[in-house]
Amino acid sequence: MALREIIILPDKRLREISKPVAEVTSEIRKLADDMFESMYEAPGIGLAATQIDVHLRVIVIDLSENRDSLQVFINPEIIGRGAELTVHEEGCLSVPNMRGNVMRHVNIRVRYLDRHGVAHDEVKRGLTAGTFQHDWATGTPTWTDTIEQGRHRGLVGLLRIGIGGQALNLGGIKRIEHRITAFSLAWSGTWPLGV
């Protein structure tokens, strides 16, 4: 296993669309192992391959206290969502020092391959479902489109109307840009609400 650098917003590599894994090989299993090591070091409970600049549809999750409940999801898909929603606090390893309340589906039906290439179709619940939804959105068109469109629309509108009639310095604009990005992602249902 090897530590990989986790890339941070606004790095444009996070906007690259992830490609499906063609075949589960020893290289893919090594990638998953490296992702776990990098996630534990950060520390976190979930990581998408895009976050370490590998643009393949792979996510890893471990919600255990002892780091002994490793879950690998290759070519993950959300194929169903329950009606019940819940809100809980989330953070993201690619957006350090920012946390917010996120609305997620309590139950989701997912399809994926495990680290051995075995296909699964199952229901995930609670924190596993929430973490899956968070990391599944990384490296998908939903993730990249929302960041780009939300930042552009939000900043242009904000700069046109101003804030209380006061001029903004560059530092103020950067802080507002980060808040608009978070808000626009929340509006799309993929990122923290109330940031």
Image (tube, helix red, strand yellow):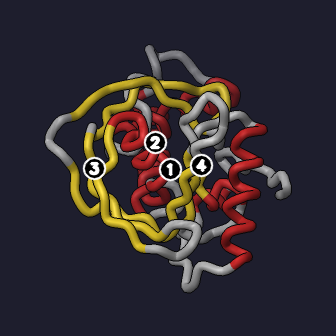
Residue at 55 percent of width and 85 percent of height? 22
Find residue 108 and name its label.
3
Look at label 4 and name its amino acid. Leu
Q: CA distance from mark 4 to mark 2?
A: 13 Å
Residue at 55 percent of width and 78 percent of height? 21
Query: In which quadrant of the rendered image does the N terminus lie?
Result: bottom right
Classify mark 1: helix, strand or loop: helix
Work out whether mark 3 precedes mark 2 in sequence or the reverse, and give the earlier one.
3
In this view, the residue in front, 20 or 14, is 20
Work out whether mark 4 precedes mark 1 in sequence or the reverse, and give the earlier one.
4
Q: 192 left or right of 116?
A: left
The image shows residue 76 at horizontal and vertical percentages of: 43, 64
Residue hosting label 1 = 135
Does 2 appear above or below 169?
below
Classify mark 2: helix, strand or loop: helix
Residue at 47 percent of width and 74 percent of height? 118
In this view, the residue in front, 119 or 135, is 119
Disc nearest the viewer among 4 and 1: 4
Residue hosting label 4 = 70
Classify mark 4: helix, strand or loop: loop
Label 3 crowd bin: few (<14), some (14–19), many (20+), radius 10 Å: many
Look at label 2 and name its amino acid. Thr
Residue 66 visible in the current orientation? yes
